[in-house]
Image: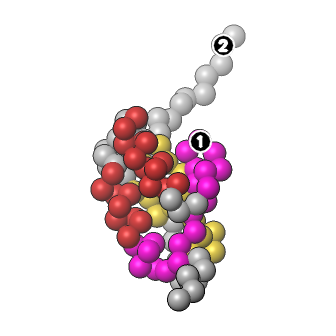
């Protein structure tokens, strides 16, 4: 049986507060594609089912109040939405002037 070629490609970026959780997320993602930045992977998956399994696995690894993972589809028929797992928000910085 010939392995299925990946059809679903994602750019996965994450901001994980805890070192252990961050390492677990990194280890999981490294099994699906190359790291392209410290917290960014290019992920290739063979099917929608594999995509759903990866999302579920990532969701189990994070603290949704402290962490965030974003999955940006690069090319996937029928999958054009951006997925964000977790509620962590970046702090907004107010601009100011020193005179």
The crowding category of the residue bearing disc 2, from other C-alpha atoms within 10 Å (few below 14, some 14 to 19, many at least 20), is few
Secondary element under disc 1, as helix, strand or loop, is: loop
Camera-side residue of 40 and 6: 6
Residue 76, quarter of picture: bottom right
Drawn side of residue 40 relative to residue 91, left or right: right
Task: Please name the colour scheme applied to the rendered image.
Answer: secondary structure
The crowding category of the residue bearing disc 1, from other C-alpha atoms within 10 Å (few below 14, some 14 to 19, many at least 20), is few
Drawn side of residue 28 relative to residue 60, left or right: right
Q: Position of residue 62 (x, y in %)?
A: 34, 49
Sequence-wise, which precedes: disc 2 or disc 1? 1
Residue 56, quarter of picture: bottom left
Q: Residue furthest right?
A: 99
Eyeballing the image, is 6 above or below 11? below
Q: Position of residue 29 (x, y in %)?
A: 49, 56
Quadrant holding the C terminus: top right
Q: In front of the other: label 2 or label 1?
A: 1
> Which portion, as a residue range, is magenta?
34-52
Q: Which residue is mark 1?
A: 38
Q: Residue furthest front?
A: 1
**Residue 98: mark in rendering:** 2
């Amino acid at each position: 049986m010939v392995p299925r070629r990946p059809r679903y490609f994602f750019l996965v970026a994450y901001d994980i507060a805890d070192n252990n959780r961050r390492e677990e997320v990194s280890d999981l993602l490294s099994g699906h594609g190359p790291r392209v930045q410290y917290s960014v992977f290019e992920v290739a998956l063979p099917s929608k089912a594999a995509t759903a399994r990866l999302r579920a696995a990532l969701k189990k690894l994070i603290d949704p109040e402290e962490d965030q993972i974003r999955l940006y589809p690069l090319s996937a028929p029928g999958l054009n939405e951006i997925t964000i797992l977790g509620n962590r928000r970046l702090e907004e910085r107010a601009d100011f002037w020193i005179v």
